[in-house]
Image (cartoon, coloured by chain):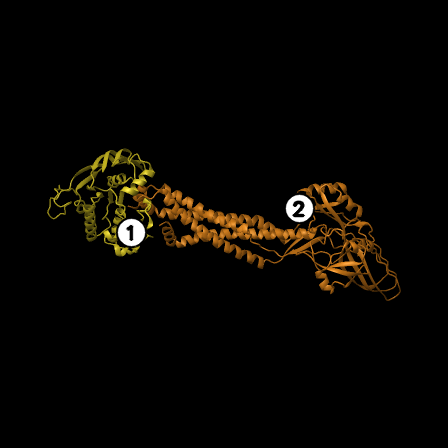
Chain colours: A orange, B yellow
Amino acid sequence: MFITYLLRELRRRMRQAIFIALGLALGVGLVITVTAAASGVSAGQGTVLKSLYGVGTDITVTKTPTASSGGGPGFRFGGGKGTSVSRSVLVSGGLGTLKSSDVTAVAGQKDVSAAVGALVLNDLKFSGSFSPGGTGGGRGGQSAGSSGSFNANSFTVTGVDPADDSLGPLASGTIISGHAITSSEAHKNVAVVDSDYATSASLKVGSTVAVAGRNFTVVGIVRAAQGVTDADVYIPLARAQALASMTNEVNTIYVSAASATDVAAAASAVSRALPGATVTTSSDLASQVTGSLSSASTLAKSMGKWLAVVVLAVAFGLASLLTVSAVTRRVREFGTLKAIGWTSRRIIRQVMGEALVIGVVGGAVGVAIGYAAAAVVQAMVPPLTATTGSANQHSGGFGRPAAAAAHTVSVHLTAPVSGSAVVLAVALAIAGGLVAGSFGSWRAVRLRPAAALARVV
Amino acid sequence: MYELSGVTKVYPKGRTTVHALQGVDLAIEDGDWLAIQGPTGHGKSTLLQILGGLDRPTSGSVRLSDRDLATLKEKELTKVRAASIGFIFQTFNLIPTLTAQENVETALVPLGVSTGERRERASQALADVGLAERARHLPSELSGGQQQRVAIARALVKRPAVLLADEPTGNLDEGTRDEIMALLGELWRERGLTMVMVTHDSSVAKRAQRIGLMREGKLTVRHAASPDPGLPCGVPGRHALRVLD
């Protein structure tokens, strides 16, 4: 009798039941979609931060460049009329220098588990011809009485310490061909090339790439993590220092804290050890990230969350109102059932059962809506960008100190629907049904049979 | 069966107070058929509701066999209604989404009867009121008279000690009214039911053994009369008094 009565009643007020179920479905679907989008945005932010840091990096240490810092030899040309020149140099454009001994000092700090240094450089190549008058260029790039036409090309080069490849700029990438630079190759002219650069420059393992005019053998191709814009070419740190005339110098130190909870303490220790340095943690970077990814994060986490809450609250409220209204319309029915001996508990069970079925149906439809909407979000949202002025800077050039250059990462947003989000959403739908049923049951229980029947007569 | 003593019912209505029942004393024996007449708003239905445990008196006692309904808790009252009291309403009060068979079965649900026995007894009850072939019809597919027959079947399927009817023919035409009253009369005779019926209709009231008159919350009861040969009597052979309209 319970099931029969329940199903017949739902069929009788099918339109209302569908309306309530759809309301709950909308709220549930929104919760799933917003949760999925928020997960995707968090994942995107994680990718951004990883790209800026490398996997395993909790802290980066850099130094603000001064006018005289930045390393790199100047250009000097000489010769008579119509002289053709081609010169390639390595320069550290946007970062000040730190000593290799600073890396050791940082590694020895409390709460620090490891530290590696790197040199982030630009390989600048000039080629062309010039008229006599002698053109000299030091770090300031001065010239006098010359004319000519030049082509300038550049690509980014990072000197990495092969002793520890779990930390640093290469850590987030994947070697897809060949191998990473080994410790035995620390002083050799070997290079690992970014896959996109390799494609554009037609490089493969065994090819030769010129860095600062020296030929380097490509021993590996690395694919950067999604959305990461890293160096084009990686060479051993020692070779980069030599070619850039920056012996025993680095311009970025990558630091791994002993544990996630020690990051702040480690950062403080490093700051004390290197008073003039800029110490940046991942949370510092996260707060600096701007761009459409940051906007999407705000949208998903605050507005999206509140929108889902509001829609669910409205759905709950509507469901409750409509259920109470349906119970009120069945005053005679419930009064009669009480008159013939049905207990209040049996009637409550009936009302709650009807509301629960609507809730479950709403939850199921909501899950389908959530999955569909998340798929649409994933398919339709254009790549988002995240920009921060930070550690890995691959710009600036000609020996001039550059302003802290922005680092922009492009991220394709995903919207993964997690099992826990589905469970939460279905639980919310069922809760909505139970809330509505409770209001309806309260209304039904308050009904006195005599009063219920008297209304009708 | 019933012993009412000093029953009063007072309730507020807006700014006034309504004295629906004023010191009603009434005894109903097993197998009695009592019809209660009176002007509208003078307490007939209130008395019926108190007899059925649907409402409580403000004061006085309402003994049904050995139990005082006025003092029972709601749960116990519900059990008494489930097992011992059958109701018939003016507007039939069938559940619109259930078939005739299922409507009759609703009376057996609170008694914990097994599904098989419930169906069998409901089916028999419908047959007893001449509606076996309409078992699968919804109330909307039945005439007024048929719906009232289903309601009678629902009231009687649990073999109640007493049948309470509130204007059972109020919504029926004359011909159907007579059919229903004939059916009720037959069932009353065959099963030895105790019946209490509220009605405006004198022709219905005259069928009863005794007729009560409610005026301003006070009840006077006399045996049914058959002063005119043309008027129907309560039970054949019984002496009857003139009935007041």
| Distance from the alpha carbon under mark 1 to that under mark 2 | 74 Å
Query: Between A310 and A162, which is closer to the camera in this rendering?
Result: A162
| Disc 2, SS | helix
Please identify the residue farthest to the bottom as the structure is shown.
A82
What chain is tagged by disc 1? Answer: B
Q: Residues within 10 Å of mark 1 (few under 14, many from 20)?
A: few
Image spot of residue B178 (x, y percent): 19, 51
User: Picture quarter containing residue B130?
Assistant: bottom left
Up/down of B79 relative to A161, above or below: above
User: Picture quarter containing residue A208?
Assistant: bottom right
Q: Are marks 1 and 2 on the same chain?
A: no
Q: Which residue is mark 1?
A: B120
Up/down of A282 relative to A368, above or below: above
Q: Residue at x 30, y 49 (%)?
A: B117
* Amino acid tagged 1: Glu
B90 vs B232, left or right, is right
Which numbered marker is on residue A283? 2
